[in-house]
Structures are given as structure tokens and as C-alpha cells.
Image (tube, rainbow, N blue to C red):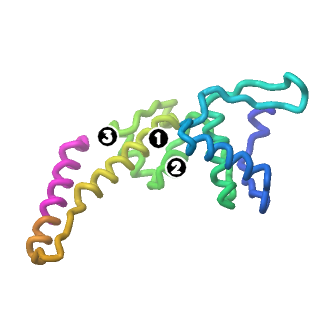
Amino acid sequence: MDAADLRQETYLPESGSRELAKVHEFLVDHETTGRGEISPRFLLVGPGAGDRVEIPAEVYGVLRQVIEAMSRGLAVTVVPQTQTLTTQQAAELLGVSRPTLIRLLERGQIPFEKAGSHRRVLLRSVLAYRNERREQQYEALDATSIDIDEEQDIESVLASLREARHKVASQRRSSSPRSA
């Protein structure tokens, strides 16, 4: 199968698929019986004797996620993606506008290459930025959360919230590069 044959495809779980349930149960049982995750050696077995091939850990990770989703009755979509993205593709992946992505590129927050007048962004860089940003958002949420004592007066609770917001804003300002 060459690259031209690859396309986005959605797979629906067969309702009540016993084969899928067996695979899911095997994986869950293996992890919950204290044996931990499956060892890093994975095999794809064919119908003939000795008909098998070892598959890489990243392929196992994809299969594990597909099995988990389908066992919950969810559909799974596989979207082949090039390793190099246009700015529009990168913006769509991040859920931002193209001008916002351009600003991120120009600030150096996401590395890119120029091919003539066109910017090209590595998929790996976009995913790394997305994960880093997600971690920052979780940290900001943690920083703004406070324990509220029901006996505490509302003014001190509001003061604690203001202090937490100022702390997060200060951290954001100090960690983000300034625009030129």
C-alpha cells in the first residue's frame, strides 16, 4: 500500500464483539493482577505456523487505544498525517486561527522551517507545543484552586482567589517571550 492509498477512515465497533472483549479483558486483567503493563515485546500472529512478526511499541500503543475505545462502544477514526504541516494544518490541529499560529511561530514558541515564502511546521513540534500548553493550563487551574472553609468569610475567599489569579498572571508574563 503506497501513500496515495492512505485515507481517513472511521471504524465502528461491532456491537457485542466477543473477540474485542477478549482482547480488552486480557489487557485489563494483565495490568490489574499486578503484572503491570504488557512487556515491550509485541507480536502480530498470522494463520500459519510460524507466521508472526514483532510490532513496534508505538503500534502497540495505537492498538491499545483503539481496543479501549471500541470496547466502550466508541468509533475510532484513523487519519494519516504527514510529518510536515502547513500553517493552516498546524492551526487546525491546535484549534487556533492561522494568524495566531503565525504569531506563535514568529515568537519562537513553535519551531518552523521556511520553504521559499512558505512556513512548514513539524507535526512533532506542534504536538509538543500542544502538550506543553495543556500542562501549563492544568498548572494554572491548580494554582487558582483554593480550599474553601465554609466558616471563612467571603471577603477572605475573594482575596485568596485574587492572589492566586495574580500569581498565575505573573508566572505567565515571566514565562512567555515578549513580542518584538
Disc 2 or disc 3, which is closer to the eye?
Answer: 2
Q: Amino acid at mark 1?
A: Val
The residue wearing badge 2 is: 93
- Residue 10 or 94: which is nearer the viewer? 10
Q: Indicate the quadrant containing the N terminus: top left, top right, bottom left or bottom right.
A: top right
Q: Are marks 3 and 1 in contact (CB under 8 Å)?
A: no
The image position of residue 64, as x and y in percent, is 64, 43
At mark 3, the secondary structure is loop
Q: Magenta residues, as a range?
A: 162-179
Whether residue 177 is in magenta: the answer is yes
At mark 2, the secondary structure is helix
The residue wearing badge 3 is: 107
Q: Residue 61 bears which disc, if any?
A: none
Query: From mark 3 to mark 1, how far is it between C-alphas?
Result: 14 Å
Q: Residue at x 60, y 29 (%)?
A: 39
Q: Residue at x 79, y 39 (%)?
A: 5
- Residue 170 or 149: which is nearer the viewer? 149
At mark 1, the secondary structure is helix
Q: Amino acid at mark 2?
A: Leu
When asked about the image quadrant of residue 162, the answer is: bottom left
Q: Indicate the quadrant containing the C terminus: top left, top right, bottom left or bottom right.
A: top left
The residue wearing badge 1 is: 126
- Residue 21 or 156: which is nearer the viewer? 21
Query: From mark 1 to mark 2, how far is it between C-alphas?
Result: 8 Å
Q: Residue at x 68, y 52 (%)?
A: 77
Residue 161 against residue 140 in the figure, above or below? below
Q: Are marks 1 and 2 in contact (CB under 8 Å)?
A: yes
Q: Residue furthest front?
A: 33
